[in-house]
Image: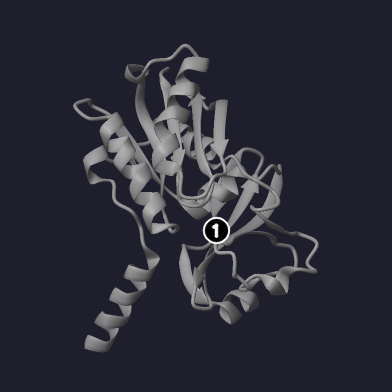
Amino acid sequence: MDYVLGIDTSSVELGVGLAQEDRPVMAVSRYLRHSHAEHIAQSIDYLLGANAAKAEDIVCAGIAVGPGSFTGLRIGIAFLKGFFFGRDARVFPVSSLESMAGSWNARRARIVCASDARNGEVFWARFERTDDTISRLSPDALAPEDEFRNALDAGDVVITDTLGYGKSRVFAFLKERPNAFSVERCPLQRGLSCAMIAAKRIGDATGWTTVERVLPLYLHAVSAEKRRTGQAG
């Protein structure tokens, strides 16, 4: 079986990874702000070279499509379109919240992943990890901080990402919670997570698309459209 490439540029971390036959192979991460465009090609070249692989060996990829950094998401998707240009390839769009959950090193846990959406709002979703399987328990949502706070259960592992926003205070209430972790203090291999999520779905046509059809998912835009149509109705 060919390698499956994973890319996550939704946050400060630039994460890329390779999976093969449902197994992790290698991950590369860089934590330099505003440097995804400069380093993504170099990181993937290193990943391929370290495994004696060529670009032509990659025919499938999983990529984080949001929610997350507007610029970061566009860089990752643009790179993938260039990487697969002129080739028949399949792409599995991955929620960036799910890539966070898939990166968490736990055999069994209920995991809430959240990122700062600014203006007192949070992107979040709940997942359950059982052995090597991630199951979604709620859809990705954009919610006010107090709504997010009230949705948390005592047994949830909470993973947060400020998306590089140095003045973020939206997760301050989690400071004393023992099972709350920030990606700034507990880095995750999200590129590898995207590769693994795609590799596990390799035999399932559901969710796969062509590289030309991959678009960023901006929950702000989705929520605005829902409000517009609701008001119109």
Instruction: List x then y, in percent, for residue 184.
Output: 65, 53
**Residue labelled with disc 1:** 164
- Residue 164 x, y percent position in the rendering: 55, 58
User: Which residue is painted at 47% across and 11% down in the image?
Assistant: 52
Q: Is residue 222 visible?
A: yes
Front residue of 104/86: it is 86
Q: Is residue 141 left or right of residue 133?
A: left
Q: Is residue 200 above or below residue 75?
A: above
Query: Percent from the top left, x then y, of residue 95?
Result: 45, 52
Residue type at mark 1: give it: Gly
Can residue 210 be seen from the camera position used here? no
Residue 67 lies in quadrant: bottom left
Q: Looking at the picture, how far across and down is residue 4, in whole percent?
A: 43, 27
Q: Is residue 42 above or below residue 2?
A: below
**Is 132 on the left-hand or right-hand side of 140?**
right
Q: Secondary structure at mark 1?
A: loop
Q: Residue furthest top?
A: 52
**Which image quarter holds the N terminus?**
top left
What residue occupies the far left of the structure in this picture? 86
- The C terminus: image quadrant: bottom left
